[in-house]
Image (cartoon, coloured by chain):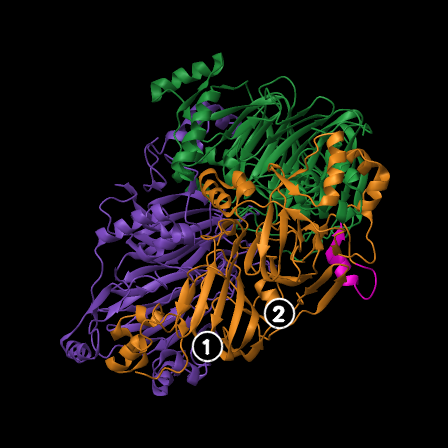
Chain colours: A purple, B green, C orange
Amino acid sequence: MAERRPSLQLSEEQQCRIQRLTAAQPTQRIESEGGVTEIWDERQEQFQCAGVVAMRNTIRANGLSLPNYHPTPRLVFIERGQGFIGITFPGCAETYHAHTTQRTRERSEEETQRGSGKDMHQKVHRIRRGDIVAIPAGAAHWCYNDGNEELIAVSINDLNHMSNQLDQKFRAFYLAGGVPQRGQQEQARQKFQNIFRAFDANLMAEAFNVPQEIVQRMQTEEEERGLIVIARERMSFITPEEKQEEWGRQSAADNGMEESFCTMKIRTNIENRREADMYSRQAGKLNVVDRNKLPILKYMDLSAEKGNLYPNALLSPDWAMHGHTIVYVTKGDAKIEVVGHNGQALMNDRVNQGDMFVVPQYYTSSCRAGNNGFEWVAFKTTGWPMRNPVAGYTSVMRAMPLQVLTNIYQISPNQAQGLKMNRGSQSFLLSPGGRQY
Amino acid sequence: MAERRPSLQLSEEQQCRIQRLTAAQPTQRIESEGGVTEIWDERQEQFQCAGVVAMRNTIRANGLSLPNYHPTPRLVFIERGQGFIGITFPGCAETYHAHTTQRTRERSEEETQRGSGKDMHQKVHRIRRGDIVAIPAGAAHWCYNDGNEELIAVSINDLNHMSNQLDQKFRAFYLAGGVPQRGQQEQARQKFQNIFRAFDANLMAEAFNVPQEIVQRMQTEEEERGLIVIARERMSFITPEEKQEEWGRQSAADNGMEESFCTMKIRTNIENRREADMYSRQAGKLNVVDRNKLPILKYMDLSAEKGNLYPNALLSPDWAMHGHTIVYVTKGDAKIEVVGHNGQALMNDRVNQGDMFVVPQYYTSSCRAGNNGFEWVAFKTTGWPMRNPVAGYTSVMRAMPLQVLTNIYQISPNQAQGLKMNRGSQSFLLSPGGRQY
Amino acid sequence: MAERRPSLQLSEEQQCRIQRLTAAQPTQRIESEGGVTEIWDERQEQFQCAGVVAMRNTIRANGLSLPNYHPTPRLVFIERGQGFIGITFPGCAETYHAHTTQRTRERSEEETQRGSGKDMHQKVHRIRRGDIVAIPAGAAHWCYNDGNEELIAVSINDLNHMSNQLDQKFRAFYLAGGVPQRGQQEQARQKFQNIFRAFDANLMAEAFNVPQEIVQRMQTEEEERGLIVIARERMSFITPEEKQEEWGRQSAADNGMEESFCTMKIRTNIENRREADMYSRQAGKLNVVDRNKLPILKYMDLSAEKGNLYPNALLSPDWAMHGHTIVYVTKGDAKIEVVGHNGQALMNDRVNQGDMFVVPQYYTSSCRAGNNGFEWVAFKTTGWPMRNPVAGYTSVMRAMPLQVLTNIYQISPNQAQGLKMNRGSQSFLLSPGGRQY
């Protein structure tokens, strides 16, 4: 809670005085050699209210997303594919060395004659479909698709987080490449900048102790390459074992924040856990990645949930206590209802695969899956998400004494008992229909 | 400190560039079947500066304040009467069951035949005159007056707290009832909304698995009932023992925040402690409820103090280091002097029972009780309140070396010694007159 | 991170949308009897962006800076001279007594006959050239120059810190004195106010139990004295041993924040450590004072660094992950290059002794010392500063696998190896020239 920055801006949107919520598609598209970057319109009132910028990166096979950092914490969901991500922190040990393909191995041998021979670098993480990846503000990172299908990564950037002492405009600082000039990309060019381009080339050459021609390569924003490039050969990396990461998690708790960033786990899978956090045979299942499962989220104050509703199943109406919710539809469709602070319906729409929408903090919303079921990932602007369902086993109705219910609704004890108990042991994942009271 | 949200708003009021502080009375009044809700004008510059909304709820005997939640932490002082409060948290155990009167017992027996028979619900807390009650943001709560006199609860809502990611307008989300239509209540209707009213009744009926007629009862905002209703019969509840609550406090410290909300103490008495935090035989006494006494205040970053000055006794001029102070006069009267950031008197007025006023953080204020003494409760926008008195035993004068005082004020060592020591062992509670140097 | 308040203001400056950074000199000057107060223009866009007010106090020999407090945490660098500083906290023990000169000793004997005789006061700290001193928001403090040369203290006040619930205007509340009337000091008079001046003299006299003539001395803002006065005789104080302070640091970690403020270390030397935090035989050295070295900075969320570059040596281009950087040049000169969020050079200037400039968070900057070397102190708006150098041993280049570099820059493995390794074991302190690859 302490890590969130308030919405004190003046505009009605930023103050969440929203008149209407709508399922949104990305409005901006940047084509690069190795893939596509799509951005949802950050000026839309629902995203202004939540203080986030949402993007979807599609990286082609053998594509490499160029290293960059941003002033905001970013939470990523890997929707499809597999790859590697490198997130660098100054001062962390370079204790990993790359697998090398035959071709690069030969080069390595050349290098052996020159010096150390082995290429040491910081930890590289294997990422796979269903992963949630946490990228702290200011940490440079790159991503490589070593699979055969596209790697699709959907992410939100939290502009309101305390770690951002700049303003609430999204920007990314690139260590290579840049936005292609073609088309009407002026707006995108303002967001994605090569930090080396404006530097004095002499100073750079001296700082790195390399010839100026290499510095020129670093400063170039090549038309056709953009923000994602195609690697010249397939790359492979040794990635740490999960066990080792778990250990890192332990040590983080012991030694405080600084030491931990080097060893801290930055990813976990939200889909393939043996046991779902919430499972209903009739309704579906739900998994959460919060600050308990991925401790780095304590510092980033973000979390995610992945849900799956069976055809026509429901989510109980609920409100979120600790942050906004940004929902991205991964499969199927659903009817969503959101009621705002003025007691009127802000949304009562069907949402489909690829749609994104915001449910503001404290606003009550419900969801009914369509005939083909409904799957989604939700990002939350809190590391400690908490649903307050009004129906089901963990609901506010069950928490209240019967006498209170009979009096507030002027109903009989039997009716109140029904309100509390008719969903039996179902949590907020509710089976369709029901009427078996 | 980390939990407060800054006053970055644009208006002069919100920036605490106040020209004048005035004792204020509530300006808005909402009559309900079971009591009255009074609200101080949140647009008044002193409340804008402090970022709080103040209210006073008067609940008649057998009155039930309808369940609601708000996007702000709320700190409540029970000025009069007694009752029960239920604060619900999702996921906490329902381990309490209600006392039942004869009439409801019969109904319970009916229910026994239907199912579990026992009504299980979350903890209900006994509250009494002099209690400070902490209600976290987003937690639904209800309050019932089981006494014979009115239950009067004065409270402030901290709009600037980090847990509020919406805006700085106060609102309350009701799970039943609503503001009566009669009169010019439009403004109030915007603040107090029934969250169920706009929901699709079919979906609600399906979610709760109850007939639509019950849903209609939940969505109704009945004219005459309002925000507080009269219970059809007297209600009674088993409340946990104090000892158990103390244990909850222990476990909170051990296990972190999540686990603790279920067991955490949410109330403590600020009046009836055997020993006052500060006591002077000649001047009065003072009790504080801060994050040490009520650990939940660490997360809510609020605190309270209850003071009692004997006739004509004084509070040393002081400034508050960690937050704004919102004073509510409970008895007697006093002369209050506040000096602002521009070195001019912002207030030099007599305040009386029922008045409320703000002393902004870092501004120096003093207080002299009237001929009948002075009693007050002060809410503070920090969980760690700290007075910086200029006179008395714990004063900044005593903290400075004699030589510094002689030089800064160009006075003799004897005079400086007087400035430091003439109040002897009196703290910032100062006996009237004095002149015995 | 949690302690910083966001830059949500509206103006372009405050949002760090800076077009140009410039080395700045103080623009305001307040002459007092015992010294001079100089203030950098807080409305300059670079200071608005960083949310700080910078000042330089020059205290003459035997000068005493009058006690005052401010709503912001302040971090001070002692550029020259020596003296004593007293920082008072309410409730901390008065366990120190002053050394007395012959003249005051006689007076003390008089006092002995009156009462306790010994002047007890709170801890006084010895400060010396090269010290970093941390002054929490709201704590009254005074400073005395007992040396023979001027005491020069350069400081920044963090207006955006959470402990400030007022606004983002700097102000200081004085317990004595005031800004001289002469000249065009109106602006300064608004910033520096005597808190006693507007108080009712009767009440003050009663509160302190002293004659009104003494109160008048406290309320006086004498023309010629100003904010810094000359002491009537030389003062001396017993200061706690360093060891004792270290112990205080230990206990702080054990007992939490409140207990610790009384015993917490508030100063440390940033120059004279036996071992620099970063040392290069060819390039220079660098020392850091962060929340690890001075734990009170955890609560103040500020830190400082003192650097020394040899003639023509370089700092690797880098970006700061956790806060803004405010650089004050203490010796020599350097060429500074800063690249902003739009990828253009915001600064490409030579800076000289006495200059101050801001490098906004996440913006990349570099530095090349002039022919006489370069020394600086940098204040940072984070208690946990972290540089992200692009060149050298701890750089982002070394952290990335060779294959990534070859692909992102389209260079050969040999060239990439050069980019990673050509600075050998040099950290971000880089020797001039180099070209020995």
Closer to us: mark 1 or mark 2?
A: 2
Instruction: Give the residue number, with chain letter if any, for mark 1.
Output: A189
- What stretch of residues is rendered in magenta? C180-195
Residue sitting at x 21%, y 76%: A115
Where is the C terminus of chain A found, in terms of image quarters?
top left
Is C194 colored magenta in this rendering?
A: yes
Q: Quadrant of residue B375?
A: top right
The answer to which of A162 and B44 lies nearer the viewer is A162
Between residues A78 and B408, which one lies in front from this camera angle? Answer: B408
B15 above or below C413?
above
Q: Is residue C340 visible?
A: yes
- Kindly identify the amino acid type of the residue bearing the numbered disc 2: Glu
Residue at the spot x=62%, y=37% of the render? C94
Give the amino acid at mark 1.
Arg
* Residue B180 visible within the image: no
Residue B360, percent from left and from top = 69, 45
Mark 1 surroundings: few (<14), some (14-19) or many (≥20) residues within 10 A: some
x and y percentages locating residue A336 in the rendered image = 42, 51
Residue toward you, C146 or A89: C146
